[in-house]
Amino acid sequence: MIIEPRVRGFMCTTAHPVGCARNVRDQIAYVVRRGPIPECPRRVAVLGCSTGYGLASRIVATFAGGAETIGVSLEREPSASRTGSAGWYNNRAFEVEAQKIGQSPLTLEGDAFSDGLKKIFIDRVREKFGQLDMLVYSMAAPVRTDPETGKTYRSAIKPLGAPVEIKTLNTETGEVFETNLAPASEDEAAATVAVMGGDDWKRWIDQLANAGVLAPRFRTLNYTYVGSELTWPIYWKGTLGRAKVDLDRKAEEIRGRLGPDAARVVALKAVVTQASSAIPVVPLYGTVLFKVMKQIGLHEGCIEQIDRLFRTRLGAGAEVDDAQRLRLDDWELSPEVQAEVARRWPLLSTATLGELADLAEYRTQFLRLFGFGIDGVDYAQDVDHRVVPG
């Protein structure tokens, strides 16, 4: 079939196997150019391994660190008439490239929130690794079923306490407008913590520790976003912020069990993901931020950010903030960047968007998530959507 992007709001319902494979190879090429990371952990698990920061972590660990990896993600296989998910193609493209350098990665596709998959994972770790040196938790899902109670929780991205009127962007039309967001109920806030807080992360680590598959000096990282004051009304001061506080709390509990450096929350910069595209204000903030950081020479995507993390923040004695987080959002939150973003913010309108922000870059990065708009790919070519090119 000839595959074209079908975008509906913040969703793209198609993905291109050739484009996804090329995107994976481009990220690998960047990491290889940067050279090896001798001190990288050698037995690495990545939960949420198929896209974004999770995929980048698996690429850096493998192609710069020489690690063998096991990944987990929930994907959609292609059918006779429908493409697979981008992550389905990414996982297979990654495996093809890793095998070329003599690695034998293992990928499990299923519900990482379930205890059933955790048990399968533990069995495979025993078979393949014996023990793990590192686990990266990079999960982003709107729904989670608690394996103990069977209750299903749905996150609600809303402010807390009072309504919030905030400027936002329709990324399809380029319209900038004000929107009024109603506050979350306590039940919605609690559900958001259940889905996006640290409960599942700690459950993973507890079960792995109880099974004896964590190596001495094991480390685990959980990726988060803190953001700037411009996004705080809907982000840090809303239901998401409450979930992030729970994440910090669970990290402290893991450190209490496994050691003072065993668990770190890592605050990363704003990038384009399918999840972030659904959060009011974040796409507009991103279009301004990207333009400013590119002009200053500080812009990073997922692969650049994670490469910097592995090279500069994983050694002994890495600097942490007051909440014991590793901070890779330091360039985004630098005074120079934030002052310029804040200067432009009140001037933003539909008419000024082209001058003050970079909507084209945002759209480009969004489509790249699904394998579209990538140099060197002939999108007019008829391709087999069930096959990932080697």
Image (cartoon, grey):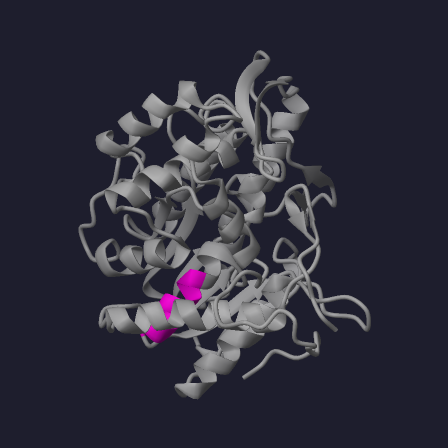
Residue farthest to the right, as pictured: 80
Q: What segment carries the magenta color? A: 56-65
Q: Does 131 lie within the magenta span?
A: no
Q: Is residue 164 visible?
A: yes
The quarter in which the N terminus is drawn is bottom right
Name above or below for residue 179 compared with residue 389.
above
Quarter of the view holding residue 56: bottom left
Front one among 154 and 207: 154
Q: Residue at x 37, y 24 (%)?
A: 344
Q: Residue at x 59, y 63 (%)?
A: 87
Name above or below for residue 132 compared with residue 295.
below
Residue farthest to the left, as pictured: 317
Q: Residue at x 49, y 45 (%)?
A: 360
Q: Does 59 lie within the magenta span?
A: yes
- 378 to the left or right of 299: right
Magenta-drawn stretch, dominant element (helix, strand or loop): helix
Front one among 45 and 32: 32
State the image coordinates of residue 302 (x, y, percent, origin top left): 41, 54
Residue farthest to the top, as pictured: 162
- 127 to the left or right of 56: right
State the image coordinates of residue 189 (x, y, percent, origin top left): 61, 26
Q: Residue at x 69, y 66 (%)?
A: 3
The quarter in which the C terminus is drawn is bottom right
Name above or below for residue 221 compared with residue 174.
below
Front one among 244 and 183: 183
Name above or below for residue 237 compared with residue 358.
above
State the image coordinates of residue 306 (x, y, percent, origin top left): 35, 57
Quarter of the view holding residue 249: top left
State the image coordinates of residue 342 (x, y, percent, origin top left): 34, 23
